[in-house]
């Protein structure tokens, strides 16, 4: 049985609990560990949806914002070979964390990892053993459940409801789910809905995480995409230090599907563990990709104010159209998505398939995000203006046909003129230049 005792000697401060030793726990039992890795290879983990390359398909399901950011070349760093990541890029990520969370953050607490689901995967590889339980809210990131199950873990879902753009949950349900769990996975704003936690609920989350000694992973990919004032953030609280690890994908944040670059941020002990695990497992981000991410990240803050205003206008437009379709939107206060509940007589898979096959429009099925028995769809509101308008028009036609299939020809379709379409503008901040 393989052991790596240098882990504990390397971190004498014990900032990471002994039972979370990443390598020793992975090989504590060879056969179960091997079985978990085989399940990981066989069980497909859904990667973030990139925009559909087919120009004839109107894609409202992808996971990336539609942004046009003017970038400039970045001077090559003499320290590009730093295994923790390009120093300038780690400083830029730390500056973003300071801006979003209103707290000091330094580059030595940031590590650059591959993008997509890699930040979450790195965190789970450090702290999740086969058979461990993880708490996640429903709905939330589709990658949470699939990544945990692929590593032999068990997901304890906590049903959440969205009211006035805020996520609310039953504290008793959270307590039941957390009793035997080791981790709590969150996204803020909530990925499928854009909703945010109320300040009192953030306090509750941290209280019960301390009570049951849960480590928290906070997906901060879309942390800059919020409406109105900056919502309450878990990492702001003094007691969160050492318990909360943040992660994000720069490709998704910046609307660059080909930018396979992400980051992890947390306590020095966790970042040291992540670095050592990366040395064992291999895999790093090329210097050219890191420089491309740095160029886009430096230009991003200049477009934030304009971007948030445009997203607010688009969100209101989409909400009106969804109501006209007979759906019930569950609007959030951030993010780039809108989640809408379907009537009881309408099945989510039926609607998604009818749009994709009959109208060549892609929307995301809410079941992918753990919406339970409630049938929902998710729409990306940040896409191309013309495609967004046309996609919603086709959605209106399909929902009308499905809801009134037994009365075709007897009723007229809804009047689209009820919706004010003059408020939609493209979400853009300039011309997109090549980055390299």
Image (spheres, rainbow, N blue to C red):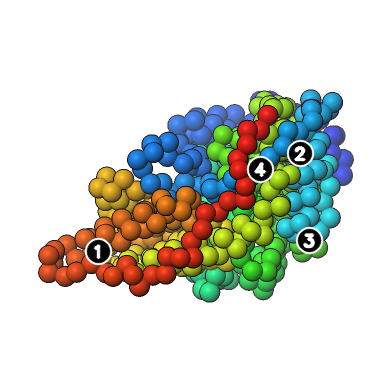
Identified at 52% across, 54% down, the residue is: 426
Question: In this picture, is 169 found above or below 256?
Answer: below
Q: Secondary structure at mark 1?
A: helix
Q: Nearer the viewer, residue 154 or 261?
A: 261
Image mark for residue 400: 1
Separation of marks 2 and 4 at Cα, in angstroms: 17 Å
Left or right: where does residue 369 sit relative to residue 359? right
Q: Name the residue tied to disc 4.
A: 70
Mark 3 vs 4, N-terminal side: 4
Left or right: where does residue 145 sit relative to residue 238? left
**Picture coordinates of residue 261, whole percent (x, y):** 65, 36
Identified at 45% across, 31% down, the residue is: 42
Mark 4 vs 1, N-terminal side: 4
Separation of marks 4 and 1 at Cα, in angstroms: 41 Å
Mark 2 vs 4, N-terminal side: 4
Mark 3 vs 2, N-terminal side: 2
Q: Name the residue tied to disc 2.
A: 89
Separation of marks 1 and 3 at Cα, in angstroms: 47 Å
Q: Nearer the viewer, residue 91 or 275?
A: 91
Image mark for residue 102: 3
Q: Nearer the viewer, residue 127 or 66?
A: 66
Q: Characterize the local packing of mark 1: few (<14), some (14-19) or many (20 or more) Cα atoms within 10 angstroms.
A: some
Q: Characterize the local packing of mark 2: few (<14), some (14-19) or many (20 or more) Cα atoms within 10 angstroms.
A: many
Separation of marks 2 and 1 at Cα, in angstroms: 49 Å
Q: Is residue 95 something one can see in this rendering? A: yes
Q: Secondary structure at mark 4?
A: loop
């Amino acid at each position: 049985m393989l052991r790596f005792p240098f882990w504990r000697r390397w971190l004498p401060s014990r900032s990471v609990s002994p039972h979370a030793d990443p390598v020793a726990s992975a090989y504590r039992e060879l056969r179960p560990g091997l079985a978990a890795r085989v399940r990981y290879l066989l069980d497909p983990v859904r990667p973030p949806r990139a925009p559909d390359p087919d120009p004839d398909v109107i894609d409202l399901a992808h996971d990336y914002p539609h942004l046009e950011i003017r970038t400039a070349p970045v001077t090559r760093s003499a320290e590009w070979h730093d295994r923790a990541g390009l120093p300038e890029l780690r400083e830029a990520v730390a500056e973003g964390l300071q801006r979003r969370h209103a707290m000091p953050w330094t580059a030595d607490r940031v590590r650059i990892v591959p993008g997509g689901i890699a930040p979450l995967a790195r965190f789970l590889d450090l702290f999740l053993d086969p058979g461990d339980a993880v708490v996640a809210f429903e709905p939330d990131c589709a990658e949470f459940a699939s990544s945990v199950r692929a590593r032999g873990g068990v997901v304890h879902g906590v049903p959440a409801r969205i009211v006035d753009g805020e996520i609310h949950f039953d504290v008793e349900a959270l307590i039941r789910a957390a009793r035997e769990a080791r981790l709590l996975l969150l996204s803020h704003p909530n990925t499928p809905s854009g909703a945010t936690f109320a300040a009192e609920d953030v306090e509750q989350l941290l209280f019960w995480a301390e009570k049951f000694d849960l480590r928290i992973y906070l997906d901060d990919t879309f942390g800059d995409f919020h409406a109105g004032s900056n919502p309450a953030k878990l990492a702001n609280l003094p007691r969160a230090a050492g318990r909360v690890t943040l992660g994000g994908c720069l490709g998704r944040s910046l609307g660059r599907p080909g930018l396979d670059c992400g980051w992890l941020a947390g306590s020095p002990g966790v970042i040291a563990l992540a670095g050592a695990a990366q040395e064992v497992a291999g895999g790093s981000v090329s210097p050219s990709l890191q420089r491309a991410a740095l160029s886009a990240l430096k230009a991003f803050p200049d477009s934030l104010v304009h971007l948030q205003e445009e997203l607010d206008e688009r969100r209101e437009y989409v909400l009106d159209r969804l109501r006209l379709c007979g759906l019930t939107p569950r609007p959030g206060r951030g993010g780039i998505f809108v989640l809408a509940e379907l009537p009881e007589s309408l099945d989510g898979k039926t609607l998604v398939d009818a749009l994709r096959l009959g109208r060549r429009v892609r929307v995301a099925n809410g079941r992918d995000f753990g919406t339970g028995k409630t049938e929902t769809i998710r729409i990306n509101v940040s896409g191309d203006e013309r495609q967004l308008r046309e996609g919603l028009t086709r959605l209106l036609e399909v929902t009308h046909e499905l809801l009134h299939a037994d009365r075709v020809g007897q009723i007229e379709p809804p009047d689209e003129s009820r919706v004010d379409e003059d408020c939609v503008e493209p979400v853009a901040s300039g011309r997109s230049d090549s980055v390299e």
